[in-house]
């Protein structure tokens, strides 16, 4: 059963509470219950984004956006049946309810099956000169400027690959041969890379006119000089939900602190005053999804930027959707930004080391507790002091289970999505209960916990290598 404590809220909670719960749990959904503990509805990440785009305040009540008729299943539904339902209805979450409509469990698509690669291509715009980063870019093209020893463009490619995007085209101009030499055909990075060479600078969108015959379906366009943890798969799902959108623009929220009191005026009168307010301004994140038909709006052989594309589509009454990016995002365009990027990555690496060490420590203690339980249980069956050993076995079991629950909570708080479910998932084919234990179910429980302690070591190793998505202050 999934640990649901972090993703259940009551009616009357604010959208701010919902966002905080989603961030803590990493589940992209909140289950909303009524005063009697029964499911009142669900709120997904997409519901919040749509509410924000409509201008809803974060102080608004969840009651205003909750889906009161979500798809649910009965408690005890098998994984196979749940997977069939979720695929048929195109949902990623399935709450399971008991007879009284109280939440018994929640299944997630990514826990039931490995998500397939996305069919979407990505075009990475990497032709700029990077003038604001001179003198670094006089010898090194901007996309190859390193953050913590790794080129920016490789970090972007890895992020796309992790989201399922494996077919990539890179638009080049300035020092193109150095970028091609570094990236090759993409095999080293686990993707397929093709190239388009701009004869002259064409802007973020102008280079797309060179790719008309290679882009037959909606595709991503991303700048090579941004550092982000954007969920590209979620953005893709969002775009597909906007049936008539010619373009989806990734939007990051930029906060500005006003160091003065701000007045609201009307006909020469002060109607409101706010002391040193913090403004949240939606800004262009340099991440887009375009329908191929939008390329027809781009004049050939002319410089054409993303803002030109957006204005042209809006002027032609085309729908341009906005996708709020809540995850970490940084435009690495200036020296200060590059220094900040290196600090952020160094901080995350240090945090990963601390977290992995903590997981190893927890795992060692957990393993010891399981061994103590196992030993006491065996001694109970082969001892004159059976009652004493029985009490020791029960105490050891309670300590092991308490440690397991502590680990469940620790993983839920510190590590995103798959790790916690991977830790808790049993593998029956690996279980080989010893005949010394009179109760087979207890043998199965001991062996299952044993395998969990081993799995925790794997999770710690993945965290240390940066292969496991974690929760830290900048994600």
Image (cartoon, rainbow, N blue to C red):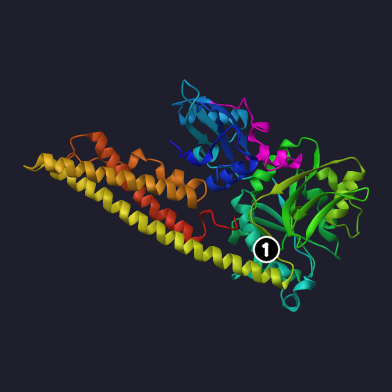
Query: Residue 442: percent from the left, percent from the top?
Result: 25, 37
Q: Can residue 299 be seen from the camera position used here? A: yes
Q: Residue at x 61, y 57 (%)?
A: 158
Farthest residue toward the left? Answer: 384
364 relative position to 203: left or right: left
Q: Residue at x 55, y 66 (%)?
A: 347
Q: Residue at x 48, y 39 (%)?
A: 5
Residue underneath mark 1: 153
Residue 395 belongs to magenta span: no
54 relative position to 441: left or right: right
Q: Quadrant of residue 195?
A: bottom right
Q: Is residue 348 above or below residue 264?
A: below
Q: Can residue 282 be seen from the camera position used here? A: no
Q: Quadrant of the C terminus?
A: bottom right
Query: Residue 441: percent from the left, percent from the top?
Result: 26, 34
Q: Is residue 81 above or below residue 285?
A: above
Nearest the camera: 33 or 437?
33
Residue 47 belongs to magenta span: yes
133 relative position to 86: left or right: right
126 relative position to 317: left or right: left
Q: Is residue 380 above or below residue 95?
A: below
Q: Which residues are magenta?
A: 45-72
Query: Residue 229: percent from the left, percent from the top?
Result: 63, 55
Nearest the camera: 164 or 97?
97
Farthest residue toward the top? Answer: 99
Q: Dot 1, crowdedness within 10 Å: few (<14), some or many (≥20)?
A: many
Q: Residue at x 92, y 45 (%)?
A: 315
Query: Residue 467: percent from the left, percent from the top?
Result: 51, 56
């Amino acid at each position: 059963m999934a640990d649901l404590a972090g993703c259940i809220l009551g009616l009357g909670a604010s959208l701010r509470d919902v966002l905080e719960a989603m961030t803590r749990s990493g589940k992209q959904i909140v289950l909303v219950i009524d005063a009697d503990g029964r499911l009142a509805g669900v709120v997904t990440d997409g519901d919040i984004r749509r509410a924000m785009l409509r201008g809803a305040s974060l102080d608004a009540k969840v009651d205003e956006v909750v889906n009161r008729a979500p798809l649910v299943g009965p408690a005890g539904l098998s994984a196979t049946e749940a997977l069939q339902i979720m695929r048929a209805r195109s949902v990623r979450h399935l709450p399971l309810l008991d007879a009284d409509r109280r939440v018994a469990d929640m299944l997630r698509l990514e826990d039931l099956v490995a998500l397939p690669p996305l069919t979407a291509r990505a075009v990475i715009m990497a032709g700029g000169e990077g003038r604001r980063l001179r003198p670094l870019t006089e010898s090194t093209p901007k996309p190859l400027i390193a953050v913590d020893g790794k080129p920016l463009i490789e970090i972007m490619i890895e992020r796309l690959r992790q989201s399922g995007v494996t077919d990539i085209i890179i638009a080049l101009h300035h020092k193109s041969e150095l970028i091609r030499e570094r990236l090759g055909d993409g095999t080293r990075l686990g993707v397929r890379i093709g190239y388009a060479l701009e004869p002259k600078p064409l802007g973020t969108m102008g280079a797309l006119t060179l790719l008309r015959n290679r882009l037959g379906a909606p595709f991503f366009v991303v700048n090579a000089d941004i550092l982000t943890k954007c969920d590209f798969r979620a953005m893709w799902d969002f775009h597909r939900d906007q049936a008539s959108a010619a373009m989806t623009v990734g939007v990051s929220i930029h906060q500005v602190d006003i160091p003065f009191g701000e007045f609201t005026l009307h006909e020469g009168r002060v109607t409101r005053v706010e002391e040193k307010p913090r403004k949240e301004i939606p800004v262009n994140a340099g991440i887009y999804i375009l329908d191929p038909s939008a390329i027809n709006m781009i004049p050939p052989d002319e410089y054409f930027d993303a803002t030109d594309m957006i204005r042209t589509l809006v002027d032609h009454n085309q729908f341009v959707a906005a996708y709020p990016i809540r995850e970490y995002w940084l435009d690495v365009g200036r020296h200060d930004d590059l220094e900040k990027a290196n600090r952020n990555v160094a901080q995350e690496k240090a945090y990963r080391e601390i977290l992995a060490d903590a997981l190893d420590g927890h795992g060692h203690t957990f393993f010891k507790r399981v061994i103590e339980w196992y030993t006491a249980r065996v001694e109970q069956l082969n001892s004159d002091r059976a009652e004493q050993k029985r009490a020791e076995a029960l105490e050891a079991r309670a300590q092991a289970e308490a440690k397991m629950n502590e680990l469940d909570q620790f993983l839920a708080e510190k590590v995103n999505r798959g790790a916690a479910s991977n830790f808790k998932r049993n593998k029956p084919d690996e279980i080989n209960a010893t005949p010394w234990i009179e109760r087979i179910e207890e043998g199965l429980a001991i062996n299952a916990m044993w395998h969990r302690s081993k799995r925790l070591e794997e999770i710690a190793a993945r965290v240390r290598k940066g292969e496991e998505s974690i929760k830290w202050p900048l994600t």
